[in-house]
Image (cartoon, grey):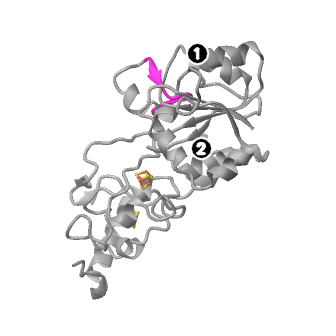
Amino acid sequence: MKVVWLQRLTCCGNTHSFLNYPYMETLLERVEFLFHPSFSLEGEEEKITSLLEKDVEIDLLIVEGAVMEEDRSLLELANRARWVMAVGNCAVYGNIPAINNSHVSGLSFRFTEKGGPLKDFVSKGGLPVINISGCPAHPEWICGTMLMLAEGVVPSLDEWNRPKAYYSDLTHWGCVRNEYFEWKVEPSWLGSPKGCLFYKFGCRGPMTHSTCNRILWNGVSSKTRAGTPCFGCTEYNFPKVGLWETKTLAGIPAELPIGVSKRGYIMLAGVAKMFAPERLKDDS
Ligand code: SF4
Ligand code: SF4
């Protein structure tokens, strides 16, 4: 599979994440990079011009970073590619570069709305822009999707055009702190190996679609395992202010886990806290 990777308004964090993929040799047996700014010797303009002039077939165009509404080489390459993939939150939703500039967006979304130069785009392979959100996106989500495409598997996408294989779970699923969540036991200090970070420290695991606690980072850990709250980096409203605290209204979290009603929360949380097993309460 022939791949072109473009960087636009980006910190290059998704390239760093990609380069951390532990099975790179396997990937490179299936994938040939025609261009990547971090490891191609030619300059982008020169290389893209030559690809377009020679009418070279491109299987997958990957874009990292938010984009300007007028980006001719992006549009020309997208129209030639069998598949187009946006990698990382800036390329997916616009994110930080788009906050104060209405001409900047993701490839096919601008925060919650359809927007960007490829908003109505359908690639030769029959899919819209495949979105791999995250800040950065997990290497497994990037490379797993590349390998699916290389093997001819068409990924099934969610409402944000993200592969369901990686984005139908919640970060909360598989978190080792679930028992604390159920009994509403919070840690008394940030970094404690025990306690759930939802009630006090801003954990967005129950509202965030990712497989971070099932496909571990570097095969080792995840934010919540390491004692840091999930910041919700795969969603359109990342980053938020006050990442380390839970906003509350009359003592109830302002945002509740997906699918939980306020009434249900009030009824269950009080009872759970009251009857929480003693063994869960010591976080020393
Ligand atoms: S720390 Fe976060 S992800 Fe883990 S159980 Fe609590 S809310 Fe869920
Ligand atoms: S745990 Fe949350 S903030 Fe961390 S990478 Fe996963 S989705 Fe993003």
Which residue type does callout 2 highlight? Arg
- Ligand 1's image quarter is bottom left
Q: Looking at mark 2, is its residue's CB closer than 8 Å to ligand 2?
A: no
Horizontal relation, residue 240 to residue 169: left or right: left
Q: Report the residue at 45% width, 30% height from top.
A: 94
Queried whether the magenta region covers residue 109, the answer comes back as: yes
- Find the magenta span and give its range: 103-113
Q: Report the residue at 34% width, 23% height from top.
A: 100
Q: Is residue 161 above or below residue 283?
A: above
Query: Which residue is farthest front?
Result: 41
Closest to the camera, between mark 1 and mark 2, is: 1
What is the x, y in percent for residue 212? 49, 58
Q: Disc 1 or 2, which lies upstream in sequence?
A: 1
Horizontal relation, residue 36 to residue 238: left or right: right
Q: Report the residue at 39% width, 76% height from top.
A: 179
Label 2: which secondary element? loop
Q: Which residue carries the number 1 mark?
A: 45
Q: Which residue carries the number 2 mark?
A: 162
- When asked about the image quadrant of residue 152, the answer is top right
Q: CA distance from mark 1 to mark 2?
A: 29 Å
Queried whether the magenta region covers residue 170, the answer comes back as: no
Q: Which part of the image, by quadrant, shows the C terminus?
A: bottom left
Q: Is residue 156 visible?
A: no
Query: Which residue is farthest bottom?
Result: 278
What is the x, y in percent for residue 202? 30, 56
Label 2 Cα crowd, 10 Å radius (few <14 / some 14-19 / many 20+):
many
Q: Nearer the viewer, residue 94 or 111?
A: 94
